Amino acid sequence: MKQLVKIHNLQDFEHAARKHLPRPLFGYIANSAEEGYTHAANRSAFDAYGLMPRAMVDVSSIALETELLGTRYQAPFGIAPMGISALSAYRGDIVQARAAAGEGLPMILSGSSLIPLEEVLEVGETDWFQAYLPGTLEEIEALLARVEKAGYRHLVITVDYAVPPNSDNNRKSGFSSPLRPSLRLAFDGLTRPRWLFGTFLRTLYRHGLPHFENNYATRGIAVMSKNVTRDFSGRRHLQWEYLERVRALWPGKLIVKGILNPTDAKRVEALGGDAVIVSNHGGRQLDYSPAALEALPAVVEAVEHIPVMIDSGFRRGTDVIKALALGARFAFIGRPMNYAAAVAGEAGVRHALRLLREEVERDMALLGVTDIHHLGREHLIERRAPAPR
């Protein structure tokens, strides 16, 4: 595709998406909480580590295959959950799921997605679903029953969303949830005709106005509404007992996402969780919380029998390598895959995944390591971290 000719790395997708997407949608994807310190720290944390290569190693074969929770994947990374992806790209959730499956990698469907989870599983071949726990046990049980019936086997519970984050940066970009019709919103759409006709109007014509399909056991509100406000309330009271109830009900793999504190990681392991994802929600929740990579080593040390995964801030193959050397089993990438889908659909996402895989493989060869499982602290040089970029 001609859109991909000038795309040489994941950062290039962001530049292309800025030109393609209406201002509110790009603003939503790129948004970070308040001053954006944690968002910037996610990137600068990688600068705290250099890489120490070995010379004259036979690197004619590099093994990237990774077993995670009983499944083998072609590389140690996948696609993180991202809400309303079907508004930034036509059938965006399915596009990402298909691309990941085609590359032998996992994709986590967001609970704030706009395509029914049953359809995404059937067409997109992903069996990972991310949920925000509803506010009552009855709603939780109903949602879990729906997810299990659909055939999902990996349930990712995000736990860093007791209340919505400060939305001032979203308001500045013109984004709200749901979107409110306005002259400015119409203008933003008209100035991006390829998105307007290729994504928004195409979706309306073929599928009707998108709704939040998967937050609960039943369909939610429309993604665009003049008078309705999306309900984020009802989670302030959630405690570990609710997660214990989820473990008792859910027969598949239970992964807890949004862990930064090693004490919380221990709690997940103690209640029978199968894995944790170290994450600060891409810097979208609590500003000045630790960078994900900064929090990773203590979480790895805290648990004994479950794998630790990570997301937030990954853009390069060397980022993935550094996280694995610090003890992560797997990394998930969010925003760049959303941008890739917006710019070039499934082909864009596959291109993004291949670019990252090629970087990891090339960097492993230059590092003198032939198997991804052989990475360790001996391959890192600790440096004084610079100020956030």
Image: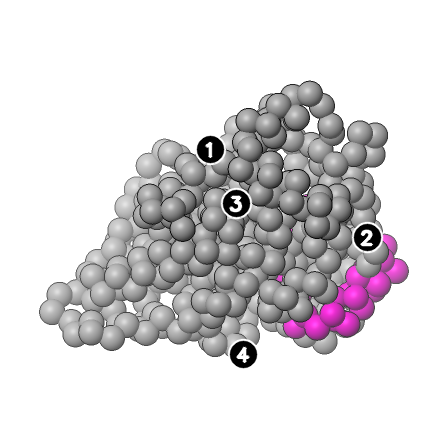
Question: Which residue is found at the position 60% from the left and 36% from the top?
Answer: 196
Residue farthest top in this picture: 183
Label 3–label 2 contact, CB within 8 A: no
Mark earlier in primary sequence (3, 2): 2
128 or 384: which is nearer to us?
128
| Mark 4 Cα shell of 10 Å, populated few (<14), some (14-19), many (≥20) | few
Q: Nearer the viewer, mark 3 or mark 4?
A: 3
Q: Which residue lies under the disc numbered 4? A: 70
What x and y, as percent, mark residue 175? 65, 31
Q: CA distance from mark 3 to mark 2?
A: 25 Å
The amino acid marked with disc number 3 is: Ala
| Mark 3 Cα shell of 10 Å, populated few (<14), some (14-19), many (≥20) | many
Q: Nearer the viewer, mark 4 or mark 1?
A: 1
Question: Which residue is found at the position 45% from the left and 67% from the top?
Answer: 103
The amino acid marked with disc number 2 is: Arg
Inspect this view and state whether residue 336 appears.
yes
Label 4–label 1 contact, CB within 8 A: no
Q: Is residue 131 above or below residue 237?
A: below
Q: Which residue lies under the disc numbered 1? A: 19
Q: CA distance from mark 3 to mark 1?
A: 11 Å
Position of 377 compared to 258: left or right?
left
190 or 324: which is nearer to us?
190
Which region of the structure is painted magenta?
A: 136-163
